Every structure is written in structure tokens, then in C-alpha cells.
Amino acid sequence: MSTPLSIKIDRSSPIPLYHQVVQGIEGAIRDGSLASGTRLENEIELAQRLRLSRPTIRKAMDDLVQSGLLVRKRGVGTQVVSSQIRRHLELSSLNDDLERAGKKPSTSLLSFEHIPAPEQIQELLSLPKDVSVYHFTRLRSAGGSPLALMENWVRDDIVELDEKSLRTRGLYELLREAGVNFRLAQQRIGATIADGAQAEALDTEAGSALVTMQRTAVDDTGRNVETGSHVYRADAYSFEMTLVQR
Amino acid sequence: MSTPLSIKIDRSSPIPLYHQVVQGIEGAIRDGSLASGTRLENEIELAQRLRLSRPTIRKAMDDLVQSGLLVRKRGVGTQVVSSQIRRHLELSSLNDDLERAGKKPSTSLLSFEHIPAPEQIQELLSLPKDVSVYHFTRLRSAGGSPLALMENWVRDDIVELDEKSLRTRGLYELLREAGVNFRLAQQRIGATIADGAQAEALDTEAGSALVTMQRTAVDDTGRNVETGSHVYRADAYSFEMTLVQR
DNA sequence: GGTATGTTTTTGTCAGGACAATTGGACAAG
DNA sequence: CTTGTCCAATTGTCCTGACAAAAACATACC
């Protein structure tokens, strides 16, 4: 019944053992050797076969259940989840999404300023009084057609931004490079109707549907690094996510 | 520096110990005795004080980090995250806001049928050939004003539905009662503009913005139980979520 | 034939211990 | 004053072991 799983464990690797198991199972699911609905070996057997302890296996399983690839049931076993349901909603950026999809994103910088934080932004980012912000708007296109209009505020005591780097690189890429480790983001997704300016920028018509997204991102030290307000052409973008019952 | 935390552990309770710790810390954060940014005691100390093992404490912390209430850093400690973000996390949607404002949601059933599954639905739910579906549309209102138009398909080999119960009870309530344990849901959020029929049902104007959501839900045995397509008035609803970097 | 009642399988919870990796600060060296 | 080095604190990883709880299945009994 249970499918034997071939995973290589490299004990000299710097990658934690449990994560090697995660990668192994993830890979097996992706390349089809673990079909959806298959029952895995039980934890104890798997642990013995890989010469790992049961807690290590369980830690790996926990991660996979959390990311929605496996389903566990006491007394029954662990199954690969239905293949319709898959992946998503990581803390990623539009830029990452597009690159992953193999589309070449391009960005044009519509405005850029370095200013004292407006009151509302100061509150949103919980800024000390003396910290200023970068404020800029960008237009992101993929495959030649405009996709998103993005307005962002970034505190200036963490990273130094300039127009040139924003033209060529993604914001999250730049922040990560500056040593920012994102931990949390809070976002709200809604809808609106394109006004004249938005329609023109996005090469669509006033009155067409737009997806709106506001996001505030927090780094590992608890600072609110960035907040932004984005609009996407609804005919070209939607948010996909997998929710896991805990 | 670290704040001493008073949590009661009841070893005779059926609630797992680690979850009692989760509840305790959650409570302390919510009622303000653990202010945002506070550093917790370190894991070992906390474990000793509560007379629990470190793995148990860690399991609790894992859950709290996952749900976005805590942030950990090796060599440094564990902190309560910014209250700004937390506030958003609690008001999870405008719908909740409405409920909290004392406006009771109500539902009316607009259509109901029990039919063989259309091809597209059969595929979405991975249905065997002989399974039929319930197909119905509902209108959800809050405080007297319409909020959402919901169209759903449910496979008929898991639960028996009728018009009467759908008028008075929520769909998920009915499914849970029938013994369905949800584990996963995949959803897609986008935007559109209201057509004539939608506008009329939602008491708004054609051409106004709507938030769209398609969802497919999976139970603990891996079956796709339900799929639905909902539209919300954008001026009354948005999706709010907290993403956690893993 | 149907209904209890065990029995087995499997995941869930919990303990205690050991060492590794990272961070931040103190302190010394240049 | 800057840079490098070491140390202490703290979380991260991994192990062994044990028992509880739930589910599925087989068996015995009426």
C-alpha cells in the first residue's frame, strides 16, 4: 500500500536533515513519482529506512503539511494531497512571481522622492520622528504590456535607494541585498475601478476592473520596513493561495 | 529585560500542554501584559518555570511564530511583533468589522438544483463519473445591505443538502456537521466589474467594482468537497491576511 | 446478521539531553 | 579609532524513549 520513497540524505551537507527530507518529498511529488492520493510509509518505518529519528521525520512532515502538500490523519497515515490543490502565497513579490513564471518583467520609474514621512506613513511604519522615507511609483510590465502600478514608501535608515537601481532591480531584491530579512507581511486585497490616470498608465480604459493590494512588510528585527499600495489589471493578474486548516 | 510570564498549566486538561502555552501567550499579548516588542524569557528558563520540557515550549513557539505573533532570532531571543501588524491581523476582514458593529449577516437562497456535474465542475472536484452535485446561489447581506453573491457546487455523495437547511444555516456549518473535516482550500482572488444581474442583486450599479473569489476546499481524506465562485461589493469587502516567511 | 469488544496500526504528545550555529558584546591588538 | 578575537547567551537541529488517542479491522458473541 505505502509507497517506498527514495531520498538521499547527505549528513555532511549544511542543509538540515529535516529539510533534506522536505526537499526529497517535494521533489518526488513534483516529478510524479509520488502521485496525488498516495499514502506514504509510516513515520517510524521511514525514519528507520533513512536512518533518521522520528522527530526529524515529523518536523519534515509538519513543514509539508503546513505548505499544503501532505495531509495526515491519526490511525490512518499520511497522504499526498490532491493535485488540483497546489502551492502558493509565500511572502513573495510580483517581480519574483513573474520571474518564476519565466516572463521578463520590466519596470519604469514614474516618480521618485526622498521626503520626511507623511503622518499617515509614519504611523503605518511606526517610524521614529527623525526617519525619512523614499516615496516612488513604478509601472511594471510583462511581455510588453503593463500589468501593475505600484506606489511604495520605504524607510531610509535601512537601505539607500536611488532611481537607477529601482529602474533595473526589484524592490525586494534590493532590500534583501541590503541585509533585510523579511519575516511578516500584512496585506489587504480588494478591487476598484480604474480612474483616468490609472487607465492611461496601464494602457486600459477608465472604468475597467483593477485588483488593489496594500502591504506592509516587517523584517526579523520587528521593524516595518516598507509599505505600498499597488493596483493590477484584473484581466492579467489575480492572487492565488492555499489555506491550511490548523 | 525579559518579561516574566504567568501562565497556568493544567495537566489534567484534555488540551495539549503546548497548546495551553499558546493560549497563555496569545492571551497575554492580547490583554497587553506582553507589550509589542517585548522580549520573552528564553526557552529553557520558561520550560523550567512552567515545568515543561523544552520541546513542548518550542512547539508552542513554533505555532505562534507561524501565526505571526512572535518573531525569533537565534542568539538573540524571541520578541512579540509590532502591534501595528497585529491590529490588522485581528480585524481579519471588513465582514468581521460589520459583524462586530452589530450587523448580523443574513443569507437568502436565490437558486437551488441537484444535477449531474457539468464537465468543468467534474474536473475541478475530480469527481467520479457517477457522482452528481448540488448547485446553488446565495446572497449574503449584512445590516440589511447586500454584500456578496455566492455560487457553489457541492458533491452529493458526502452530504445531503436541501433548500431549507441552506436558508437557515451556513454551508460550512452543514458540511462540518455531516462529518467533513476541512484541511485545505485553494483560492484565487481577483476583480471584475458588475454586470446588470450582479448589480441588481447586490443593490449597486452596473460597472462598479467587485472582488471575485474562487475556492475549492479539500477534506482530510483528500476529496475535493466543494467549489464556489463568489463576488463581493468592493466597497464593503476586502481580504486581509498575514504572510509569514518560513 | 448485527453488535460489542479487542487488537493493531498510525499519528499525537511529552520528556530529557546533547551539540551546533548565530548573534552581540566585551576586550585586546594594531 | 578601528579591527579582530573570544565568550556568553540564545535559538536551531537531532537523538532516544515512552505512552496516549484515534481509526480501521478482525473476532467473538448474542
Image (cartoon, coloured by chain):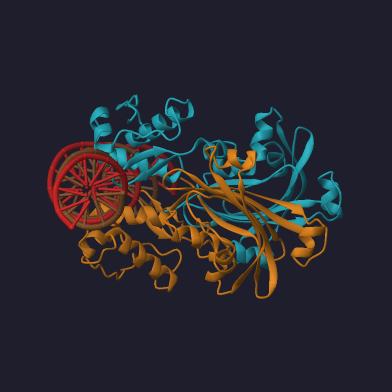
Chain colours: A orange, B cyan, C red, D brown
Q: Position of residue A220 (x, y in %)?
A: 42, 47
Q: Quadrant of residue B21?
A: top left
Residue A203 in the image: state x and y as whole percent. 77, 67
Please state if A105 lies on the left or on the right of D13 as rendered: right
- Looking at the image, which residue is at 22% across and 64% down? A49
Q: Quadrant of residue B106?
A: top right
Could you tell whether B152 is left or right of A101 in the image?
A: right
Relative height, residue B10 to residue B79 (above, below): above
From the viewer's perspective, is residue B189 above or below residue B25? below
The foreground one among A17 and A125 is A125
Judge left or right: residue B6 versus residue A190.
left
Vertical relation: B105 (above or below) D6:
above
- In depth, the one of B31 and A112 nearer the eye is A112
Q: Nearer the viewer, residue A215 or B107?
A: A215
The spot of residue A123 in percent (x, y) is 59, 38
Q: How many numbered dots are placed on residues in this image?
A: 0
Rendered-image quadrant of the N terminus of chain A: bottom left
Q: Is residue B130 visible?
A: no
Identify which residue, A155 or A151, lies in the foreground: A155
Residue drawn where x is 62% and y is 71% of the image: A106
Say which quarter of the image contains residue B176: top right
Residue B236 is situated, as x and y percent measured from the top left of the image, at 73, 42
Can residue B202 be seen in the rendering of this structure?
yes
What residue do we see at 75% from left, 44% from top? B235
Q: Is residue A5 left or right of residue B197?
A: left
